[in-house]
Amino acid sequence: MRAVVMYAPGEVRVDETERPTIVEPTDAVIKLAATCICGSDLWPYRGADDVHHQPMGHEYVGVVEEVGADVVEIRVGDFVVGTFFSSDNTCEICRAGYQTHCVHRGPGAVPGAQAEYARIPHADGTLVATPAMPDHDLVPSLLAASDVLGTGWFAAVAAEVGPGKTVAVVGDGAVGLLGVLAAKQLGAERIIAMSRHADRQSLAREFGATDIVEERGDAGVERIKELTDGLGAHSTIEAVGTQESMMQAIRATRAGGHVGYVGVSHEVVLPGEELFFSGVHLHGGPAPVRRFLPELIKLIWDRAIDPGKVFDLTLPLEQAAEGYRAMDERRATKVLLTV
Ligand SMILES: [Zn+2]
C-alpha cells in the first residue's frame, strides 16, 4: 500500500509499504476514506521534534476491513471515526472522560494514518461507527472530528466555555478555528479570535467569532483587556503551544477565569509567581477526543456544524510532500489527502 513517511525534517515521501494486519485480538484494520496533515506534524517537519523514517498521520476515517477475535462492538463494513491515541474506554481514567490517558494506551499516537490502510489498537474503545455510510460531502467534517474538532472542543470545555461567557482564542490554525466553532455551540456570548490572516479571520467569523484581534503578545493582551472592561476573558483557548501563546492566554484571562490549553507544549516554562497571583485555572493537554466523538458525529450527521470547512486544500496522497510545504508556508490551514 502507499503510505506517507517522513525520512527527516522537511523530507516527506510516499512509499510502498506493507499493508497492516491484525496483531492483537483487540485490533481492527481500516481502509482510509480520507486522511489529513495535522499542525502538529509540522513540529518534526520543521526539526522541532526528532524524526527518522517515521510513518505519518494520526487523523482518520474509513471502513473497517478486518477485526481481531476480541472485537465485539465494531464490525467489518462499519464506517468509523477514530482518535489519535487508542483507548480501551473501560478503565477508570477512560470512564472519567480522559481517554487520552488510558492506562492501556500504548506508547504513542496511532501511527501511519496517512496511508491506504491503518491498524487501530483497542478498536472497540477507540473507534466510533457512524449511523450508516456517510454522504460523500460529510467525510471532511467526520475527519475533522478525529482530531482538530475534538481538540478544539475539549479546549473550550476545559476553558469552561458556556452561556454568557466571553471567550478569547489564541491561535488561528485548524484547532483554534474549531475552538471558535465549539465556543459558539457551547453558548458563548462573545468570541474573540486572535488572527492576522484575512482568510482565517473570515472563517473564524463564519464559525461564530464576534471580534477579531490582530495584535499579538502583550499588545494582544491589551486589546483583549480593552474589549472586556479591563478584566480579561472568562475563558481562553490556547491552541499553539509556544511560550508566547501560553503567556498570552494566561494574561488575557481574568482572575477566576479558565485557560484550556491544547497546543502541544514546546519548551513552555511557566513563571510560578505570575501564575500564583493570576488566580487563573489551567487545564488541558492531549484532548480526550473519544469523550466527545458520539456527540460530534451526531452534530455533523444532523448537519448542525460543518467543521470540514477548515480543509482549504485537497491533494491526492501522492502529493503529500506538497501538502506539508503548503501548511509549513501557511499557504494552507489544513490539507486533506484523498486516498
Ligand atoms: Zn482506558
Image (cartoon, rainbow, N blue to C red):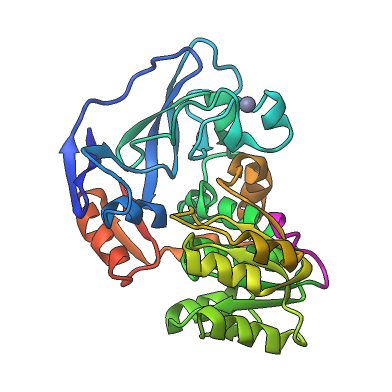
Is residue 322 found left or right of 331 in the rendered image? left
The residue at the point 41 percent across, 42 percent down is 58
- Which image quadrant for residue 103? top right
Q: Is residue 4 visible?
A: yes
Front position in the image: 67 or 85: 85
337 over 123 or under it: above or below: below
Q: Quadrant of ligand 1?
A: top right
Residue 162 located within the stretch drawn in magenta: yes
Q: Is residue 74 visible?
A: no
Secondary structure mainly formed by the magenta segment: loop
Is residue 9 found left or right of 184 in the rendered image? left
The residue at the point 55 percent across, 75 percent down is 204
- Which image quadrant for residue 304? bottom right
Residue 137 located within the stretch drawn in magenta: no
Quarter of the image for the C terminus: give it: top left
User: Which residues lie in the magenta part?
Assistant: 157-164
Residue at the extreme front of the image, as rendered:
273
Q: Position of residue 51 (x, y in %)?
A: 26, 43
Residue at the extreme top of the image, as rendered:
69
